[in-house]
Image: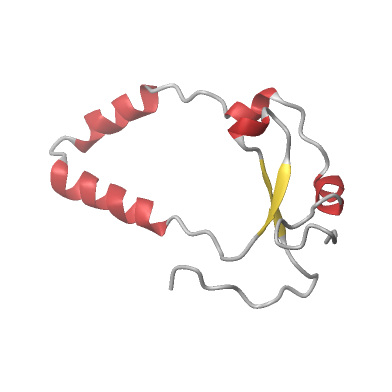
Amino acid sequence: MLHETRPPHPLGTLYRMHFPKYRKGECRVKPIKTETTFRYVEDLMGFIMGEVFVDQEAYREELLKISIPPDLSSEFEHPEKEEVIANYVSRFNPGEAV
């Protein structure tokens, strides 16, 4: 199920920090609705390494040489998560803070 919600957390709603590009470093929080899984990436890489590439070690060495740039949000100062959550207002209930 794509949009399945998780059972309530004992501490209440959980949030994650979000740094949208269009906000130029301004932080937002979003409620966490489902558990994030990246198992499909491991499955895909296993398939590629096992079925597609004959010389896997040469590919891995080249892959490790690629430089990964820092996240765009790393250029900006990150506020405290508790402060951002305290200022969170849902767009569906704009009059009340969470």
Q: Nearer the viewer, residue 54 or 15?
A: 15
Q: Tell me: residue 29, above or below residue 11.
A: above
Q: How is the image coloured?
A: secondary structure
Left or right of residue 84: residue 46 = left
Residue 22 horizontal/vertical position (percent): 61, 32
Left or right of residue 52: residue 77 = right
Q: Tell me: residue 85, above or below residue 61.
A: below
Q: Residue at x 66, y 28 (%)?
A: 74
Q: Tell me: residue 53, above or below residue 36.
A: above
Residue 92 horizontal/vertical position (percent): 70, 61
Q: Identify the image quadrant of residue 93.
A: bottom right
Q: Residue at x 53, y 59 (%)?
A: 36
Left or right of residue 91: residue 20 = left
Q: Residue at x 16, y 39 (%)?
A: 53
Quarter the N terminus occupies: bottom left
Residue 39 horizontal/vertical position (percent): 40, 58
Q: Nearer the viewer, residue 46 or 78?
A: 78
Q: Nearer the viewer, residue 59 or 9?
A: 9
Left or right of residue 84: residue 41 = left
Quarter the C terminus occupies: bottom right
Q: Tell me: residue 59, above or below residue 16.
A: above
- The number of numbered discs placed on residues in the rendered structure image is 0
